[in-house]
Image (spheres, rainbow, N blue to C red):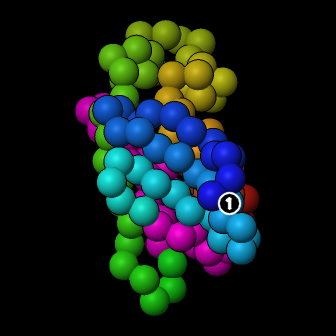
Amino acid sequence: MPAPEWSGRLGRLRAELRTADDGRRVLTVGDRQVVVRPDAAVRHRGGLLHHRITVEQPGEPVFTVRYRPSWHARLGPLLDATHDRWAAESDDPGLELTARLGGTDDWVDDRADT
């Protein structure tokens, strides 16, 4: 398989997004893997203690990853009045991963556009 399109850590879990030779996009988080099809709905949701990325695809079980971000990522929105999407992206690599997969998050939600 070629070099990862994206790699990072989601909490304590190592995560990689690769494009296979046949064009499939494969997301690996820890010891779990999912092929992310073009019709997948990817969502990132933040919380005070955990963040969650879900990949929903027709005919497949939902792939969910829960992870605990750094303290700074958890407390930033509460303590910093200027905390915005760019600060959140630097604290939480899951936001960049979600954007690469064409998903939505708490900062940019597809329902707001309709």
Look at the image and tell me whether residue 32 can be seen.
Answer: yes
For residue 112, side relative to residue 59 (left or right): right
Q: Position of residue 84 (x, y in %)?
A: 61, 23
For residue 113, side relative to residue 43 (left or right): right
Q: Is residue 81 above or below residue 7?
A: above
Q: Position of residue 13 (x, y in %)?
A: 35, 39
Instruction: Tell me which segment is drawn in magenta.
Output: 34-56
In the rendered image, which quarter contains the N terminus? bottom right
The residue beneath circle 1 is 19
Q: Is residue 68 above or below residue 55?
A: above
Q: Is residue 110 magenta?
A: no
Instruction: Give the residue displayed 46% in from the left and 67% down from the top.
Output: 34
For residue 58, side relative to residue 39 (left or right): left
In the rendered image, which quarter contains the C terminus? bottom right
Instruction: Give the residue displayed 51% in from the left and 78% down from the top.
Output: 57
Point out the residue furthest to the front here. Answer: 1
Q: Is residue 38 magenta?
A: yes
> Which residue is nearer to you in this view: 46 or 70?
70
Q: Secondary structure at mark 1?
A: strand
Q: Is residue 83 above or below residue 40?
A: above
Amino acid type at circle 1 is Thr
> Which residue is nearer to you in this view: 13 or 43?
13
